[in-house]
Image (cartoon, rainbow, N blue to C red):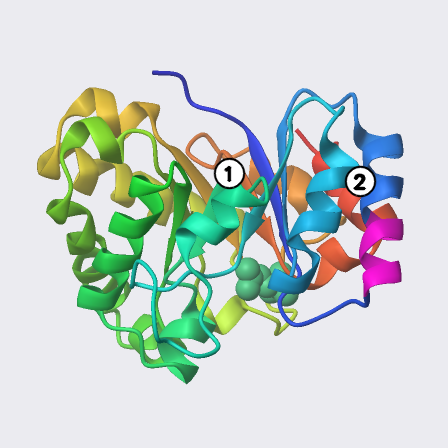
Amino acid sequence: MSRKKIVAGNWKMNTSLTEASELVKRVVKEAGNAPVIKIFFPPFTFLKPVADELTSSNDFFMGAQNCSEHEKGAYTGEISASMISSVGGKYVLVGHSERRTYFKESNEQLTQKIQQALKNNLVPVFCFGEQLAERKSDKHFDTVMKQLTVLKNFPKEQVQNFVLAYEPVWAIGTGETATPQQAQEMHAYIRKTLSEMFDASLASGISILYGGSCNAQNAKELFSCADVDGGLIGGASLKAEDFCKIINSF
Ligand code: PGA
């Protein structure tokens, strides 16, 4: 099991079809040679067009920002993991803080979403992180530990292939990023927790990304931390030049 370097762009509810395909084309052209796994998380409507741009490109993948916890059926407006897989998706974000906050996603729902992802050969990118009040009151480790308990619902053989993304909520979209020391400290804590929950080889082999106002200026320092394997990038992934710089920050 090898730890992979990954830079992923979470576009959230942004871009038109034209903007989506121009952005992907530029990134493929300008950052295609970087020896890093690159993942685009476009809105559902642009999954297929983005996947089509990537068919002949190495180390580029497409994923979805969410999937239903249900397999299929009468769930108007929902998108299933099998649909994502059928248009070429390889990854799916599960547990992003915006989903937890605005859509009240519970640990039970997140578990079901991961089950659906696995059934359909999608790699879950499991996101978690503390709120500002939790950090201020020194509860950030406890919060993360509780969020990580979702992983206990899966065997080691499955979890070792997940990607994790630590995203402190106070850093998402705020321009206030975690310092490299704060990121490293939490990533080391996550590995220690995983080592107790599973074993040392899973803990040292799994890729853990940092997310939260990571940009072209601070990516290098964040990615140089021993336990940070890359980034989940929001705002800065919408600008081709910035995203390429971040990809080249290792
Ligand atoms: P940000 O978002 O880079 O805009 O802070 C990160 C994320 O929400 O994944």
Task: Specify the amino acid type for callout 2.
Answer: Cys
Asked whether residue 21 appears in the rendered view, the answer is yes
Q: Residue at x 53, y 67 (%)?
A: 171
Q: Is residue 20 magenta?
A: yes
The C terminus, quarter of image: top right
Question: Nearest the camera: 91 or 172?
Answer: 91
Vertical placement of residue 159 versus 68, above or below:
above
Q: From the top left corner, tell me how far across and down residue 162 is, in percent.
A: 35, 37
Which quadrant would residue 146 be assigned to in this image? bottom left
Q: From the top left corner, tell me how far across and down residue 74 is, in percent.
A: 35, 75
Q: Residue at x 28, y 65 (%)?
A: 140
Which quadrant would residue 37 be assigned to in this image? top right
Q: Which residue is mark 1?
A: 90
Horizontal side of 100 relative to 203 (left or right) equals right
Horizontal side of 125 relative to 14 (left or right) equals left
Q: From the top left corner, tell me how far across and down residue 215 is, in percent.
A: 70, 53
- Please tell me whether mark 1 or mark 2 is closer to you in this view: 1
Question: Nearest the camera: 205 or 73?
Answer: 73
Magenta range:
17-23
Q: Which residue is mark 2?
A: 244
